[in-house]
Amino acid sequence: MAMRQQNGEGQTVGNQWTGFAFGVVVALASSSGAVWAQPCVLPDNGSGTVTLPPEGCGYLSPDDVHELLVGLPIGTSIQIAAEHEFFFCLSCVGGPNDGQPCTPTVGCPAPGVCTDGNSTCSFPTTDGCNRQGPGGGELDCSESRLTLDMQGTGSLSGFSRLITMPVEFEAHLGPRNLMQPVQSFDTDMFRLQGQINPIGDPDFDLLRIRGGTDFGHPSPGHTTLTVNPGPPPGTPGATWTVDSFFDIEYEIEFTGKPCPGSQLCGMSGSTTGTIRMQTGAPVCGPNATQTACIQTTCPVPPSGECVAHCGKLNPFTGQVTVNSCDCGSLNECHLVVPQIPAPAVVAGVGGNPCVVLDNGGGSVDLPPAGCDYLSPDEVHKIIDGLPAGRKSIWPRSTRISFAAELGRRIQFARSRHSRIAKRRVGRWVARRSVLNRRSSSN
């Protein structure tokens, strides 16, 4: 959704965030991990382009969710992952196939009638979904299906539903250059609405979605068609890859069933938000390890690059987990993920990990038996007492079983129960600390 919460403080350098506090930044309703849309490939319709909406391709929200907030208890929401798919012009009204798609030649079993039945469109669709639009553009109108994966949070954390809602919509497309290998044009979701049949539904007396520019919810978009290698546009066998998105402003209304019997009893409300629904393109989002954003081509508009907007800092490792990425300019405010170099040598002998058995108390005994302490990227030096001109001697390999020696001396002191022995251990530790400081200063 087009809502974001940010917690913590960061230093600002130009328009880049480079510093954080603990629990730094959280993006509301963002997904973790990379999400890639499935490629949308359509056959050429014979005129050097494709027929839209893209039959067989779904529009989904790859890194955002719809959300129900208003009318729910404080701290509670219903998050909705949606997929808009299964586009068709005509459907059966009545009969055994009521609501199913049909064509004028393949009708509906009696008493059903194959008709447009679409009250949302501004033009009749009895002879097809498409009309020529103003300025050489196109008007598309279809019935479709919206699949809603609903998950509750807060006091509704046990709520989980998968609902299929019939949806009608009308989209306006800008003009495109037929027969060209790349066709790029603006689009607009003009009208979109749908609601479930509440009869028999266990939770909702009303669940309705409404969006689109003509309904007071601006929903611009963009589509790019790219011909695939092989036959040229307009010839048999030619295929196209479709990249298309809409930034849909929507309104979701709901009313819960009467009490008792439903988790939503006595609740109702209407929530408005904006979400990107997209088909066909690799999505601008975090990569699989959440260490950076996916390197993908951003649509025009908004163009720019796929940059990090929200992340979370681990103060113990210095690593930043990228939670959200958006297309935008590098001159705009965005998150710059610091590159933390990997340690030169892993703790343990020669880079080997130090593994010690549990001591039965949920921990280990120290010093670690069988593990040595070494200086992986520094050396001790011998300097004082060497001839002039010879500044130092650097041992080729330095391995110090400091912990093992300390443990031996402590055991000796305990066995003697002697204050003198304990003082000797203390003086030994102090001498080693002084030597280490001198080595570091040199």
Image (tube, grey):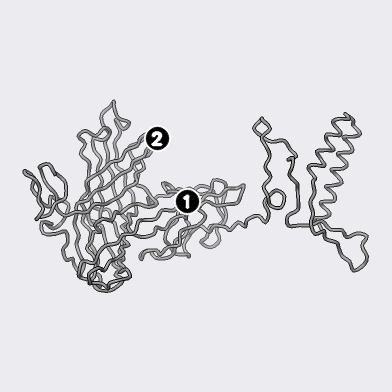
Q: Is residue 174 left or right of residue 12?
A: left
Mark 1: amino acid: Asn
SS category of the residue bearing label 1: strand
SS category of the residue bearing label 2: loop
Measured as percent of width and height from the top left, residue 313 is found at: 56, 49
- Which one is in front, 424 or 273? 424
Label 2 near label 1: C-beta < 8 Å? no
Q: Residue 323 carries which label?
A: 1
Residue in the image at 62% along x and 47% along y: 316
Residue in the image at 50% along x and 47% along y: 7
Measured as percent of width and height from the top left, residue 305 is found at: 44, 64
The C terminus sits in image quarter: bottom right
Residue in the image at 21% along x and 36% along y: 198
9 lies above or below 53: above
Mark 2: amino acid: Ser
For marks 1 and 2, the one nearer the N-term is: 2
Measured as percent of width and height from the top left, residue 347 is found at: 69, 49
255 lies above or below 117: above
Q: Distance between the residues labelled 1 and 2?
A: 22 Å
Crowding at mark 1 (Cα within 10 Å: few <14, some 14-19, many 20+): many
Answer with the quarter of the image where residue 297 lies. Answer: bottom left
Q: Name the residue under label 2.
A: 157
Kindly give the residue lying farthest to the top in the view shown: 260
Crowding at mark 2 (Cα within 10 Å: few <14, some 14-19, many 20+): few
- Which one is in front, 320 or 273? 320
- Which one is in front, 394 or 431? 394
Residue in the image at 46% along x and 54% along y: 286
